[in-house]
Amino acid sequence: MKRKQGSTIFLKVVIFLVGIAVLAVCIFGLPQKKTLKKHFYNG
């Protein structure tokens, strides 16, 4: 049973870290992309 519990904790940690990475991209990456797009395609 110890192995299964360790695997579950590992999986939860990995999913949490992936979620943090996606959130960081949404907060920092997308606004920058929008600014660059506005700068280059503003006519």
Image (spheres, rainbow, N blue to C red):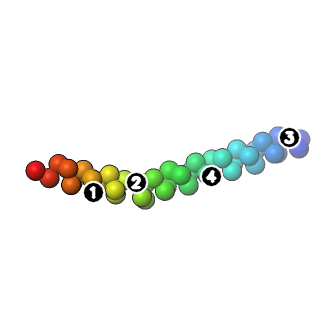
Label 1, on which residue? 35
- For this view, does 10 lie left or right of residue 21? right
Residue 26 position, x and y percent, is 43, 54
Q: Residue 19 carries which label?
A: none
Q: Distance between the residues labelled 2 and 4?
A: 19 Å
Establish if 11 lies above or below 31.
above
Q: Tell me the residue at 45%/53% (across/down).
A: 25
Could you say which quadrant of the image residue 2 lies in?
top right
Q: How far apart are marks 4 and 1 (CA)?
A: 29 Å
Whichever of labels 3 and 1 marks the residue nearer the N terminus, that label is 3
Whichever of labels 3 and 4 marks the residue nearer the N terminus, that label is 3
Q: Distance between the residues labelled 3 and 4?
A: 20 Å
- For this view, does 41 lie left or right of residue 20? left
Secondary structure beneath disc 4? helix
Label 2, on which residue? 29
Secondary structure beneath disc 2? helix
Q: Tell me the residue at 74%/46% (across/down).
A: 10
Label 3, on which residue? 3
Label 4 or label 1, whichever lies nearer to me, is 1
